[in-house]
Image (cartoon, grey):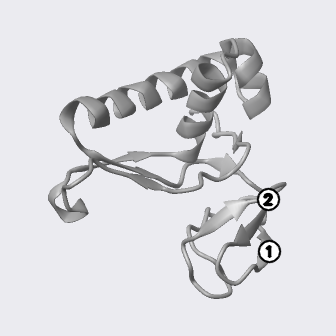
Amino acid sequence: MPRPMKYRIVNGHPVTNVFKPAGIPQRQLEEVLLTLDELESLRLADLEGQYQEEAAKHMGISRQTFGNIVESARKKVADVLVNGKSLRIEGGYVDLSNLPFMCSDCHQKWNIPPGSPVSQNCPNCGSDRIHSV
């Protein structure tokens, strides 16, 4: 029987959740999904330059799990860049319960309860312009 998955601790929500090549309509592009834990692994390893052991502790997972996540994320980003695909960032098995969010449109603030799916929209007005505060 496999071990149950642990929620991964992430440091926030991206400012935007879709990236695509300029000048090509989104509907014409193949889309690659990058999860929030994969984005966090890229941030810790590649942007902040942390070693896998240290980054894994920040995310509350093992070094081996971190290595698997960051490897998957790098392959997806390379696929997007090399093959001209769009990248959508959402979902994943993450714990955002300690992070308050705010809607840029109506300024509503809220927390996501532990174990709840990560919503990409404001619970008040439905806007997708949300960010962690």
Q: Considering only order in the chain, which callout, 2 or 1, is on the residue closer to the N terminus?
A: 1
Residue type, mark 2 in image? Val
In the rendered view, tell whether residue 6 sits above or below residue 78.
below
104 to 35, vertically: above or below: below
Q: Is residue 100 something one can see in this rendering?
A: yes
* Residue located farthest toward the front when viewing the structure as drawn: 23
What residue sits 61% from the left and 25% below the top?
Answer: 47
> Where residue 73 sits in the image (x, y, percent)?
45, 31
> Of the residues shown, which amino acid type is indicated by label 1?
Lys
Residue carrying label 2: 133
Q: Position of residue 75 (x, y in %)?
A: 36, 26
Label 1 belongs to which residue? Answer: 109
Residue 36 in the image: x percent, y percent? Answer: 57, 46
Circle 2 SS class: loop
Most extreme residue toward the left is 28
Instruction: Give neighbour class at mark 2: few <14, some 14-19, many 20+ (Cα, 10 Å).
Output: few
Residue occupying the point 21% across, 40% down: 84
Residue contact between numbered discs 1 and 2, judged by CB atoms under 8 Å = yes
